[in-house]
Image (tube, helix red, strand yellow):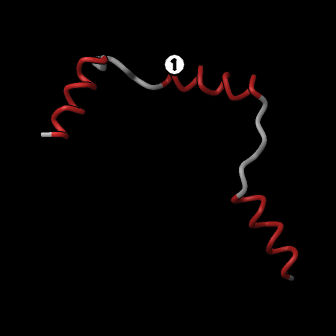
Amino acid sequence: MCNSELIHCLEQALLPKRVSPEAYLQRARVLRQVIATDGVNMGGIQDTIDEGWS
């Protein structure tokens, strides 16, 4: 493998891919449906943050 091939492979693996806003939002919607958020609320989040400051 020559240097240009190696650079191309690294670019493909490491550089961010352009994603349309619609695809990005669709992925966010899917993740929201998959991730369990039972028992998570703003009060619990704030309590956890406050504990970290004490």
Looking at the picture, how far across and down is residue 54, in whole percent?
12, 40
- Residue at 84% in and 81% down: 3
Residue sitting at the far bottom: 2
- Residue at 51% in and 19% down: 33
Q: Nearer the viewer, residue 9 or 42?
A: 42
Looking at the picture, how far across and down is residue 20, in whole percent?
78, 30
Vertically, is 40 above or below 20?
A: above
Q: Determine crowd level at label 1: few under 14, some 14-19, many 20+ residues with C-alpha closer than 10 A.
A: few
- Report which quarter residue 50 is drawn in: top left
Q: Nearer the viewer, residue 33 or 54?
A: 54
Vertically, is 41 above or below 10?
A: above
**Mark 1 residue element:** helix
- Residue at 74% in and 26% down: 21
In this rendering, position of residue 48 left or right of residue 29? left
- Report which quarter residue 10 is drawn in: bottom right
Looking at the picture, how far across and down is residue 5, in whole percent?
86, 73
Pointer 1 residue: 33
